[in-house]
Amino acid sequence: MAKNLFVAYVLWWFLGWLGVHHFYLGRDRHAFVWWATGGGIFGLGWFRDMWRLPSYVDSANEEPYYMERLTEMIRIRKSPPFNPSRFIGQACFGTFLGYLSMLAISEDFAVAYPIVRSLVVPFSVAIGVHIVGNIGRETGHFKWAIVGAVIPALKLISNPHIVVYMALLSAILFQRDRSFKRKPSQRGLCSRLFVLFVAGSMIMSLWGSALYFNASVTTSDGETIRFRDAVDHFFGSPIWKEFKETIKALFHEGWEKGWENMWSRFVQSLDPEGEQNAYQVLGLSKGVTQAEITKRYRTLVREMHPDKIRNGNKEEAAAAFMKIQSAYETLSKIKEKRARRQNYRKQKEYEFRDM
């Protein structure tokens, strides 16, 4: 069925950052890249499509003038001319997939099995370069993409910027063996959707793994908390339990005191360390001493120990008892860390005065 330029522009305007207009035109790889990178490197590709869409529609419809020009170019040239935009896209998307796959592997696992990251990252870079290189009426072999990604990894695998070198060399070597694509592959709608679903699921899995294993948040006290620990504490945080009240309080506080520190106040309301929830479990207010925390903990342990519950649900009592223990351990660790940090600062101040 012929593609309509007006429909393509409507899809581009409203759903362009998802690549829907490219999917409409049968450019599934293009659509996937746009979806994965927020409209082609955070909207740059989407903006470029504004004047490129007529050509894409003509290609999809195989307009006579377009096919005549393509046939003439194939007759004159053995390979497509170098396209700077495509080359930059290959390098950027290869870098994106390379870093994403690197972050998806936990540091502990990477230290224990370094060979895994050494294999996965170059392969991901090559996939990114190959996908962009095969968009539209051009095609190229995966072998040159993987060779270009592997060569830097042999020498510079410990360098944090290695992914950029991999993507650049992979994109360069990919230019060696390219050819024109006379007829794009024809697949059914269900098959196309399934392939995109699998590819999208892999991207989301990488993002999820990267967030779970390597992402972190920084509290107002300068404490760095792993994302996975912060998520566990989030469901006991004030912003989750009292969402409307917390957002309203944050808004009024920002209106009265200014918006400069709004992000730090928002992070604090998420309770990434589980501190506020721990105080609520123990029935204490913030600012109490470690001695008061210990005293309260011992009192609750004596009262809530499952062995002392004669009438009632033993399982609920055990769960409450575990919460009390967890809250005490959380607050004790936080107090200990802050005490060490305060002692360190005082030591530095004394050293500075003695200089």
Image (cartoon, rainbow, N blue to C red):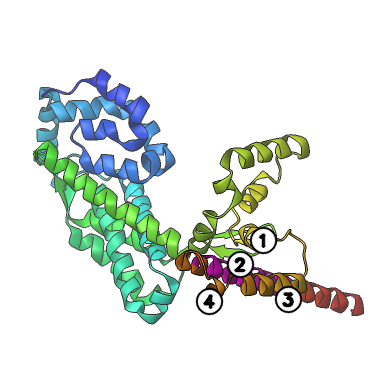
Give yes or no for residue 322 being in the magenta stretch: yes
Res. 94 visible in picture: no
* Residue tagged 1: 279
Three-letter amino acid code at the position of disc 3: Arg
In the rendered structure, which disc, 1 or 2, sits on the residue that comes first in sequence? Answer: 1
Q: Are marks 1 and 3 in contact (CB under 8 Å)?
A: no
Q: Residues within 10 Å of mark 2 (few under 14, many from 20)?
A: many
Residue 307 tag number: 4
SS state under label 1: helix
Foreground pick, 171 / 202: 202
- CA distance separating discs 2 and 3: 20 Å
User: Residue 344 in the image: x percent, y percent?
Assistant: 77, 76
Vertical side of 257 occupied by 299: above or below: below
In the rendered structure, which disc, 1 or 3, sits on the residue that comes first in sequence? Answer: 1
Q: Which residues are magenta?
A: 319-340
Vertical side of 91 occupied by 322: above or below: below
SS state under label 3: helix
- Say which quadrant the C terminus sits in: bottom right
Q: Residues within 10 Å of mark 4 (few under 14, many from 20)?
A: few
Q: Residues within 10 Å of mark 1 (few under 14, many from 20)?
A: many
- CA distance separating discs 1 and 2: 7 Å
Residue 340 tag number: 3
Mark nearest the camera among 1 and 4 is 4
- CA distance separating discs 1 and 4: 24 Å
In the rendered structure, which disc, 4 or 3, sits on the residue that comes first in sequence? Answer: 4
In the rendered structure, which disc, 2 or 3, sits on the residue that comes first in sequence? Answer: 2
Three-letter amino acid code at the position of disc 2: Ala
* Residue tagged 2: 327
